[in-house]
Image (cartoon, rainbow, N blue to C red):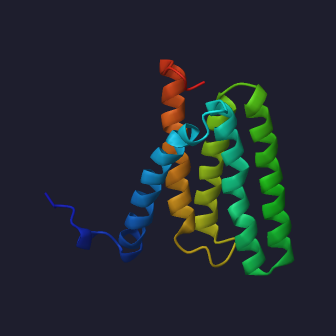
Amino acid sequence: MTSTTADSFPPLHRSLRTPVACGAVFGVLQVASPLAFPWLDARTVYALGIPLIAAVYIGFAVADGRRHVLVVESAVVAAFVVVAAAAVTGSAWFVVAGLAGHGVKDIWQHRTQFVQGTRWWPPFCAAVDFVAAALIALAITTGFPGAF
């Protein structure tokens, strides 16, 4: 039986461990973000965060410099704005879907490098998105007080 040590992982996987771990921490912090805005309900705070995190890729697209990348990333952000708007007045599950959808987009970005120069950002952001989506889904299903 072999043990799994840091040396047994390929260099790429070792180099992503820190961004993913930090992303998980930020995912927990994102779930706590409504505490910073007590005058808004949690669903609104989460919904506002969805296009905000998606818009980071517009900055990467500008840095990339290719017009088609900027167009695609702007369209993606527009789609996340629609999901966020639906989350404000619709089902809280739109928040979970928006975060999970962004996590999937991050994984796709990491694998394809569609936007050049993102380096460690997609794995970090995917971890944020998936941790936040999972914790919010848990809060919805368990009826956590004040969550929604």
- Locate residue 91 relative to residue 17 in the image: left or right: right
Residue 16 at x, y percent in the picture? 42, 68
Q: Residue at x 54, y 38 (%)?
A: 35
Above or below — where is 79 with respect to 107? above
Quarter holding residue 37: top right
Residue 125 at x, y percent in the picture? 55, 58
Q: Residue at x 50, y 40 (%)?
A: 32
Q: Residue at x 54, y 30 (%)?
A: 137
Q: Residue at x 65, y 39 (%)?
A: 45
**Residue at the left extreme of this rendering:** 1
- Locate residue 19 relative to residue 61 in the image: left or right: left
| Count of numbered badges drawn on the protein | 0
Above or below — where is 145 with respect to 15? above
- Locate residue 89 relative to residue 138 in the image: left or right: right
Work out which quarter of the rendered image holds the C terminus and state it: top right
* Foreground pick, 107 / 126: 126
- Locate residue 4 relative to residue 100 in the image: left or right: left
Residue 39 at x, y percent in the picture? 66, 33
Quarter holding residue 40: top right
Above or below — where is 65 with respect to 104? below
Above or below — where is 104 with respect to 65? above
Residue 19 at x, y percent in the picture? 44, 65
Work out which quarter of the rendered image holds the N terminus and state it: bottom left
